Amino acid sequence: MFLPLIVVHGGAGNIPDSRVQPKLDGVQRAVRCAYETYEKTKNILDATQAAVEYMETDENFNAGYGSVLTLEGEIELDALVVEGKDLKAGAVTGLRNVLHPIAVARLVMEKTPHVLLSGDGVQEFALKHNIPTESSLYTKDAWQALEHFKKNKAEPSKMEIGSGGTVGAIGIDVDGHMVSCTSTGGITGKMKGRVGDTPIPGSGGYADDNIGTVSTTGYGDAILRYNVAQRILHAIELGATAQEASEKVLQNMLDRIGKTAGAITIAKDHSIGIAFTSQRMAWAYKKENKIYYGIDKDKQFEEIF
């Protein structure tokens, strides 16, 4: 019998040294939140959502509080929830003034016949369901990153100041049921109304109990073009391990499009894939009585749970 398994990521990209330890601390805490929640509810979606919600409150990640700014200095949030039993999904894009967009995405999945809500519609939906609003999700780092972007006409993928990172959590329970949760503020200096990979099933994340579950991070427009999550699951379906599939698809995306990304993956056999072509990606998971975590390639840490 398998134990429940939850893997989280805190974003991939050009993460500066000053953000390394806060991100490592954050993904560890997110894993702890996930397992504490699972012990209470025995619900793998509750657990993965709890991990993402923790990171949405941590300014060292680019989701909820700490999200990056559009070119106009606004925050527009995206999130996606997918469950693998019935292939249900809920997503939001362009959401404003909400600390936990992942909670709204879950409500879209559970309370509507739709998959994706945007604009005024998603704001009205969140208000109708009494989702708490926040007067400000802005941080000093986000403003500095935008100013740097405007001054240097920097490509979003090359940003280092204020680098946050899309957050995600995936899980599989004792019965083999899988889920994927992903949340982001997007990229610094994005155009108003821009939609990246995160809220799109098959790109920002996906889950299928017959194959596996994935959450992606990195250069979102390229991930969207390459349909990364679905390609990883297809590779697993063809016989690759979770690790092999994640590495292969991300490398192929880099070769084909020239952009970097990262992904966390769990296959239906409970094997794990953690891969990134970006400079760094924060990640963590628990196995037996230890939390395994890292951010640099070929370097892993352990902590007693």
Image: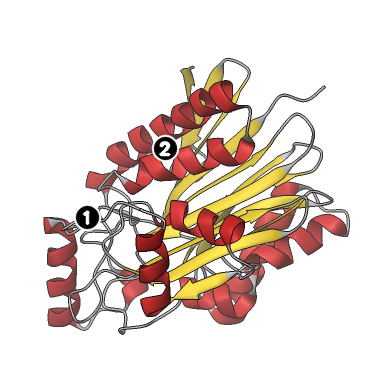
On the question of residue 279 being in view, the answer is no
The circle on residue 134 is 1
Q: Position of residue 91 (x, y in %)?
A: 53, 65
8 lies above or below 146: above
- Direction from residue 68 to residue 181 in the image, left or right: right
294 lies above or below 139: above
Label whose residue precedes the other's in the sequence (1 or 2): 2
Residue 68, located in which quarter of the rendered image? bottom left
265 lies above or below 90: above
Question: Residue at (59%, 59%) from the top-left corner?
Answer: 109
Q: Position of residue 251 (x, y in %)?
A: 63, 65
- Direction from residue 54 to residue 102 in the image, left or right: right
Classify mark 2: residues with Cα within 10 Å, few (<14), some (14-19) or many (20+).
many
Which one is in front, 181 or 24?
181
Instruction: Look at mark 2 in the image and give the residue it sits on.
Output: 27
Q: Mark 1 and mark 2: span between their CA atoms?
A: 23 Å
Which one is in front, 299 or 155?
155
Mark 1 vs mark 2: in front:
1
Question: Residue at (50%, 43%) from the top-left corner?
Answer: 49
Question: Residue at (74%, 59%) from the top-left corner?
Answer: 87
Classify mark 1: residues with Cα within 10 Å, few (<14), some (14-19) or many (20+).
few
- Outermost right residue: 238
Q: How many marks?
A: 2
Give the amino acid at mark 2: Val
On the question of residue 130 being in view, the answer is yes
Give the amino acid at mark 1: Glu
Question: Residue at (36%, 53%) from the top-left corner?
Answer: 130
Element type at mark 1: loop
Q: Position of residue 33 (x, y in %)?
A: 44, 29
Which one is in front, 209 or 27?
209
Q: Position of residue 269 (x, y in %)?
A: 81, 38
